[in-house]
Image: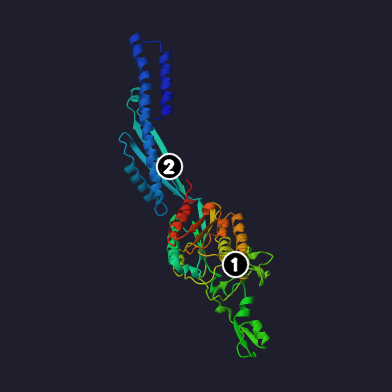
């Protein structure tokens, strides 16, 4: 019987006692003590019931957390059996009787475990006036995964990463981070990751040579063979070939190694600043296309958003350092891997979830070369525009400078980070491992809602 029911019944009995005209003084006094004993006993019995409820609540909270680790793979009957098993091990109050526990698991708008429990607590004093037991009920809810993650890893693969064990440490750190993110996912699609290795260029996949988002103008002019030219040495580009009276035959596009340079016009950034935004490529505006280049230090091909953890790990393990540094193109394509367009197809978002989009940019060097410039300040200015646009789009940007060679601390990377605590300055290669772990912990906590 609940406390409310007991109080209501006790009040009715006291009222009847007050209206009674029968009996002598002794009997009247004896009956008068019953409500008093009942009220004193009620306080004691209620305190015992409340203590039981507190203990049961703590047990159910723990049961809910334990079930959350296995709910996605348990059948309903297994979930129920495990709930009962865990509760019986945790809740050991001998005064509680007839315990029942039920558990349910849902995945609408995130994953939710609800565990309900009820027991009866026999009374010691209140049974004198007909109240035999309290019904104690409580529940616990564990909810997680209402936020889904989409993470772009923009990773420096330039030649300087070969020094001081940096590439090996990066591969270890990234593999560990991928494991953290994988473990944060309850089901496929909860966490997507893209990987964008960058040098001066980014590799968008040689197999995409027929794609309509590629601009072949410069590639055709610089990759081919000059026939019927005049002179001792064969010209190595279309302009020199024509000037030598020859006929230029461009190499087949299927020989392309997959590398592209910054989007824009041949002689510099376009008026649309397409190297700093994610406007979708269109053949009607050549500056929006990705210009192909046969860069000799082309890195591993980028991978768009995926939860193929094995393939991502294989990509990371195959990374090899070579080439010059252009953080800006890696960052721009990391953003496009989240936004979609061109080489990247982005999975649709489920309106039942919230989404957090993150870019992690790691580099060990300062900018040295892009499509148009070899002046660091010019390259940095373009990159700062990209950083500003990324943050304005609501994407969280982490920047990591691995500075083992005594370079100046990068003001650019500090300014690019979403906040001061999102910039990391590392002075040893192995610090990448701890830093990626710390960031991974922050990201996986976003997956917990309650």
Per the image, the residue denoted by label 1 is: 342
Taking the image as shown, residue 329 lies to the left or right of residue 79, namely right
Residue displayed at 32% across by 26% down: 124
Query: Residue 387 occupies which quadrant of the picture?
Result: bottom right
Residue displayed at 41% across by 38% down: 138
- Which of 95/10 is in front? 95
Query: Residue 204 occupies which quadrant of the picture?
Result: bottom right
- Which of 412/281 is in front? 412
Position of residue 383 relative to residue 39, above or below, is below
User: Pointer 2: residues within 10 angstroms few (<14), some, or many (20+)?
Assistant: many
Q: Is residue 162 visible?
A: yes
Q: Distance between the residues labelled 1 and 2?
A: 47 Å
In this rendering, the label closer to the viewer, 1 or 2 = 1
Taking the image as shown, residue 339 lies to the left or right of residue 41, namely right
- Which of 230/207 is in front? 230
Say whether disc 1 or disc 2 marks the residue closer to the N-terminus: 2
Indicate the quadrant containing the N terminus: top left, top right, bottom left or bottom right.
top left
Position of residue 33 relative to residue 442, above or below, is above
Residue 296 pos. (x, y %)? 53, 76
Secondary element type, mark 1: loop
Position of residue 122 relative to residue 331, above or below, is above
User: Pointer 1: residues within 10 angstroms few (<14), some, or many (20+)?
Assistant: many
- Proximity of marks 1 and 2: CB atoms separated by less than 8 Å: no
Residue displayed at 55% across by 75% down: 295
- Which of 81/140 is in front? 140
Residue 390 pos. (x, y %)? 59, 58
Question: So how many labels did they put on this image?
Answer: 2
Residue 18 pos. (x, y %)? 42, 14
Residue 334 pos. (x, y %)? 55, 63
Secondary element type, mark 2: strand
Per the image, the residue denoted by label 2 is: 140
Q: Is residue 313 visible?
A: no
């Amino acid at each position: 019987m609940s406390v409310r029911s007991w109080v209501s019944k006790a009040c009715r009995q006291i009222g009847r006692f007050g209206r009674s005209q029968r009996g002598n003084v002794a009997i009247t006094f004896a009956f008068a003590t019953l409500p008093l004993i009942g009220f004193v006993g009620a306080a004691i019995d209620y305190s015992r019931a409340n203590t039981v409820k507190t203990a049961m609540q703590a047990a159910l909270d723990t049961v809910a957390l334990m079930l959350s680790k296995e709910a996605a793979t348990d059948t309903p009957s297994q979930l129920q059996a495990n709930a009962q098993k865990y509760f019986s091990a945790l809740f050991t109050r001998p005064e509680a009787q007839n315990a029942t526990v039920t558990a349910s698991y849902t995945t609408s708008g995130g994953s939710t475990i609800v565990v309900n429990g009820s027991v009866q607590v026999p009374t010691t004093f209140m049974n004198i006036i007909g109240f035999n037991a309290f019904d104690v009920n409580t529940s616990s809810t564990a909810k997680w995964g209402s936020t889904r993650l989409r993470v772009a890893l923009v990773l420096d693969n330039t030649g300087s990463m070969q020094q001081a064990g940096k590439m090996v440490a990066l591969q270890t750190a990234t593999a560990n981070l991928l494991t953290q993110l994988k473990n944060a996912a309850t089901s496929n699609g909860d966490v997507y990751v893209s990987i964008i290795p960058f040098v001066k260029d980014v590799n968008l996949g040689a197999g995409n040579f027929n794609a309509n988002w590629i601009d072949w103008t410069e590639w055709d002019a610089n990759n081919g063979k000059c026939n019927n030219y005049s002179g001792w040495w064969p010209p190595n580009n279309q302009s020199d070939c024509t000037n030598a009276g020859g006929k230029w035959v461009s190499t087949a596009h299927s020989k392309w190694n997959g590398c592209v340079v910054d989007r824009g016009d041949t002689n510099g950034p376009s008026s649309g600043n397409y190297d700093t935004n994610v406007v979708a490529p269109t053949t009607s505006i050549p500056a929006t296309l990705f210009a192909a280049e046969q860069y000799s230090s082309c890195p591993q091909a980028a991978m768009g958003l995926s939860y193929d953890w094995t393939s991502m790990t294989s990509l990371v393990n195959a990374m090899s350092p070579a080439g010059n540094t252009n953080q800006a193109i890696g960052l721009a394509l990391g953003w496009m891997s989240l936004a979609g367009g061109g080489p990247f197809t982005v999975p649709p978002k489920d309106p039942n979830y919230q989404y957090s989009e993150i870019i992690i940019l790691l580099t060990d060097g300062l900018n040295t070369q892009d499509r148009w410039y070899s002046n660091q300040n010019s390259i940095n200015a373009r990159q700062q525009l990209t950083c500003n646009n990324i943050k304005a789009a609501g994407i969280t940007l982490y920047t990591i400078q691995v500075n083992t060679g005594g370079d100046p601390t990068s003001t650019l990377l500090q300014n690019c980070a979403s906040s001061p605590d999102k910039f990391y300055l590392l002075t040893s290669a192995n610090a990448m491992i701890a830093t990626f772990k710390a960031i991974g912990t922050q990201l996986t906590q976003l997956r917990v809602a309650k």
